[in-house]
Amino acid sequence: MNIEVLGALAVTENGVSITPTAPKPRQVLALLALHADRVVPVSALIEELWGAAPPRSARTTLQTYVLQLRELIAVALEKDERDGIDGEGRRTAKDVLVTMPSGYLLASGDGQSDVRTFERLAGTGYRAMDAGDFPGAARQLREALALWSGTAFADVQAGAQLEMEIRRLEESRLCALDQRIEADLRLGRHRELLAELTVLVNRYRTHESLHGQFMLALYRSGRRGEALEVYQRLRATLVRDLGLEPSAGLRRLQRSILTANPETAAPAPRTAKDRLVPTS
């Protein structure tokens, strides 16, 4: 089974799509696919589909959606029969979408999941950062981020459960992005980052780390005035929208740029655990 959720939902078995077009069966598959090989409780599926006020027929209707998914799985599994795999080696639809005492489990059969691949690559990238291997970190994190084609579950009508998972996945993506940019900064790639960071700070208008990285990239590219303007715009947004001043770290970075602190222009701190912002 191949599972893709970091963008549009796409689940295939034997290369055949088992992704339904109807919204609610699609929601069920999305939650099962995200947690493939783990039991998803009936209560979680019902909450996803109907929120805090499910109809009396919720369990029966959920069973109907499960049957619809199994029909799609059965069609995909017919490929094994066409390929001549004997009966003992073939899975049935109930083997793929398993009914458990407390819920349902989608058995991936050691297939591929873009979320699991992302988490593996990102984890490798973080460990490379901790070891001071900035080229390796940048490479692994860039590969992890390339798995994303848009917002997670972009074409799924998300309920409470999926909304929570979408926020979690987006936070994981932002963490990986932040660390990949930091690795690139430590490698002296500040000019190459300017276009990307221009887009990111406009998309995430209160994200301090991205703004700090943009300020540093601008300063190292000889654009000191623009770096300070980025700080002033962020400060105005934080005060207006959140009633907050920039963090102490960002204020230190601003002072370092104002005073042209030589450490600010250094292409790479010595260790991955050092702060992006130099102390003054």
Image (spheres, grey):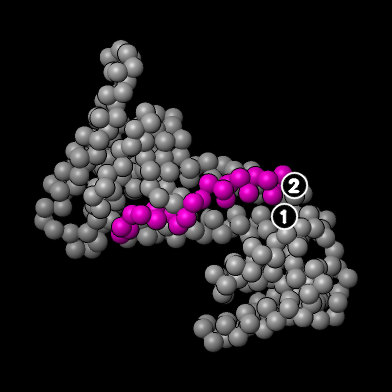
> Where in the figure is residue 256, as x and y percent of width and height?
81, 76
Q: Nearer the viewer, residue 260 or 221?
A: 221
User: Which amino acid, by three-letter code, is at mark 2?
Assistant: Pro
Residue 145 counted in the magenta span = yes
Residue under label 2? 135
User: Which amino acid, by three-letter code, is at mark 1?
Assistant: Ala
Q: Nearer the viewer, residue 151 or 164?
A: 151
Work out which residue is located at the far left of the displayed protein and give it: 56
- Label 2: few (<14), some (14–19) or many (≥20) C-alpha neighbours in 10 Å: some
Q: Tell me the number on the disc at residue 202.
A: none
Q: Which residues are magenta?
A: 135-159
Residue under label 1? 183
> Where in the figure is residue 235, as x and y percent of width and height?
63, 83
Q: Are marks 1 and 2 in contact (CB under 8 Å)?
A: yes
- Left or right side of 277 for 165: left
Whether 146 is drawn above or below 83: the answer is below
> Which image quarter holds the N terminus?
top left
